Image (spheres, helix red, strand yellow):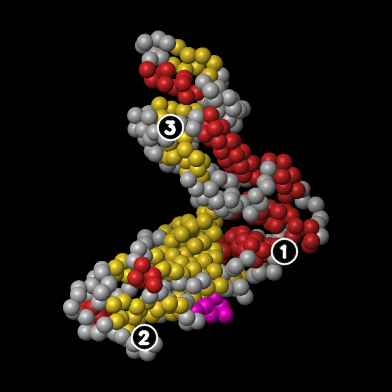
Amino acid sequence: MKHLKALLRYLAPLRHHSITQIMGFCKSQFMPAVIFHEELRPVKVINQYGLLDLTWNTIEDLMTRYRMSRDIQDGVRHIQAKLPSFLKTEKIQYRGIDFPINIGYTEPGKAQLGIYFGNDNRVKISILLSDMGPGAFTASNYSSTDVTIDESHLQALQTQLESRVPRSPAETTSLLQNFHSVIPVAYEYFSLDSDKVLLGGVYARYLPCPTCQRCSVPYHFTSLPKEVKLVAGFSSNDYNVDDWELSTGSAEVRSSFKRSDKGIRLSFTESHTTEKMTLFQYCYAVKNSDRDTLLWNSFLAEICHFKSRFDAICPSSRCKLLDFNLLYAIRWQIELEVENTPGTWPVNELYLFVNKAIISEEGYCQVPDIYWTQCPQGTTRLTALELHPFGIHYLPKLTCKANTISFDLERQSIKLLQNSYESCGLDPFSDEAARAVGPILPRHFNLGE
């Protein structure tokens, strides 16, 4: 009975179309229960935080995804307004980017949100009493390049795509760009081990079959079970390299941080205590939203083409293709630790030089040059053995993380893309669709070598 009263206290003040409504309750000591206005069916989630499985294959799926995301967020905000003692405000909310909105529970472990379908197949939120559970709820965000999307927009788009009427090239371009603008944008981040990374490159991640030798030889970038293959590249004249940034708690190290046209210099003296620090730098394939939208259009228009070319290199079709990733930025990161022991330094000052990343005309980004030296101009270099008396036992650790726009072939359907391009009289397994939507065409690499 105590739990029943607690649940009623939560639900009673909530009046919203996206929240379950109480019709009555049963005070039986054998089966206390809350009676709702309608039958409720649980919605499939993919983790304990309530993140929805929003797989899509059709325009109808996109409408469902949009409606569910909108209704859940509306309901969550109503609960925040009426029950501030239950839900905190959003921790994260990025507009136009596929980050979910994470909402923390004020008192984790007492109650949590549940998601259901009502009689009208619209989602309903309810509050579940629980002695244990996650500390936050994840409200999925519908993210696309069109931030003003609505259901009528999607319905009109579906009608246009299903009507196979003659269109001018300009009408075809407009229709496909409109179609691409409502495809949910997903972002993926993973490490690359290569000494050369292609900005604007398209990387296929896959699980190689055990017998197909041709699939595991070229473009082996990572040590993970998933293989990564560079399948194509979009050229850009808009490459951009940010300055190196320093993250450290040491005021001394920050004050020694100097920039130049070539990169940065850090200086250390024997008086420094043991220091840990991180240096990072971003490189971008594009640096303005218009170019970014063009790249997104061209990438989507080539998905069917990329897949057909990839499938052709595995005759047995046993390699499992997971996703295609358009690399729009990379993050170089250096982890550094200096374990200083006073009285051991052979000289009074030591310098670390890090050069800026260099991007070729084709978009290949070379590994930044990093070295220690006793020379303030950086004309000489110290070996790993020569660094030991300074308390430096490991060379700086450099990692490269790819920031990509991802098309997940397990959760997103190329059939919808294929049908849409064919309805416009275009061959989806060629560059025709990409030519129709914009001026950026990819370079396709030979995958069989």
Placement of 215 over or under 104, stated as above or below: below
Q: Main secondary structure of the magenta part?
A: loop
Q: Residue at x 51, y 14 (%)?
A: 24
Give percent across and percent down for residue 174: 75, 57
Mark-to-mark CA distance, 2 and 1: 55 Å
As shown in the figure, which amino acid type bears the numbered disc 1? Ala
Q: Nearer the viewer, residue 365 or 107?
A: 107
SS assignment at label 2: loop
Mark sitting on residue 112? 3
Mark-to-mark CA distance, 2 and 3: 59 Å
Does residue 385 show up?
no
Q: Residue at x 39, y 33 (%)?
A: 107
Give percent across and percent down for residue 360: 53, 80
Does residue 332 show up?
yes
Give percent across and percent down for residue 57: 59, 46
Mark sitting on residue 436? 1
Q: Which residues are magenta?
A: 358-363
Give percent across and percent down for residue 23: 54, 16
Q: Residue at x 35, y 71 (%)?
A: 253
Pointer 2 with pointer 1, Cβ within 8 A: no
Q: Nearer the viewer, residue 339 or 138?
A: 339
Q: Which residue is mark 2?
A: 376
